[in-house]
Image (cartoon, rainbow, N blue to C red):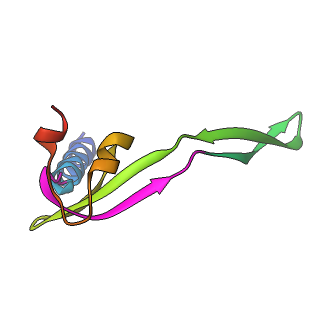
Amino acid sequence: MVKRIIIAVILSICVLLLTACKSSIDYGTVTDKQYTPARQVYSPLITIVNKQTRIILRYIHHPQMWCIYVQNENGGEWWNVTEDYYNSMEIGDFVDRSEKDE
């Protein structure tokens, strides 16, 4: 019983620490921009059927993405944005997430 309580407390502390470490940047300066075109890749999936190993190729589609890197005194993070928003931003521009969402 005591062991279960100790494990529950340790897990609770870990969850608390992991959620407390995540910081979200709500405003800052655009310091980088990145466009990733859509791509299609095949990924191997290894399965075992009737004691036989089989490799099946899976088709995975990755859509195109537009991202800007926003940095302020608290750090920085990548924001996924729309193509129009990406094209309207230049490196050095100030952005605010509350204005972006409007």
Spot occupied by residue 78 in the image (x, y as percentages of width and height):
31, 56
The residue at 15%/44% (across/down) is 97
Name the quadrant of the C terminus: top left
Is residue 82 visible in the rendered image? The answer is no
Spot occupied by residue 11 in the image (x, y as percentages of width and height):
26, 47
Majority secondary structure in the magenta region: strand
Which stretch is magenta? Answer: 23-38
Name the image quarter holding residue 99.
top left
Front-most of 67 and 73?
67
**Total number of numbered discs in the rendering:** 0
Q: Is residue 21 magenta?
A: no
Q: Is residue 24 magenta?
A: yes
User: In this rendering, would 96 be left or right of 18?
Assistant: left
User: In this rendering, would 49 be left or right of 68?
Assistant: right
The residue at 25%/39% (across/down) is 1
Front-most of 69 and 47?
69
Front-most of 22 and 69?
69
Spot occupied by residue 29 in the image (x, y as percentages of width and height):
16, 62
Name the image quarter holding residue 90.
bottom left
The residue at 18%/51% (across/down) is 24
The residue at 9%/68% (across/down) is 73
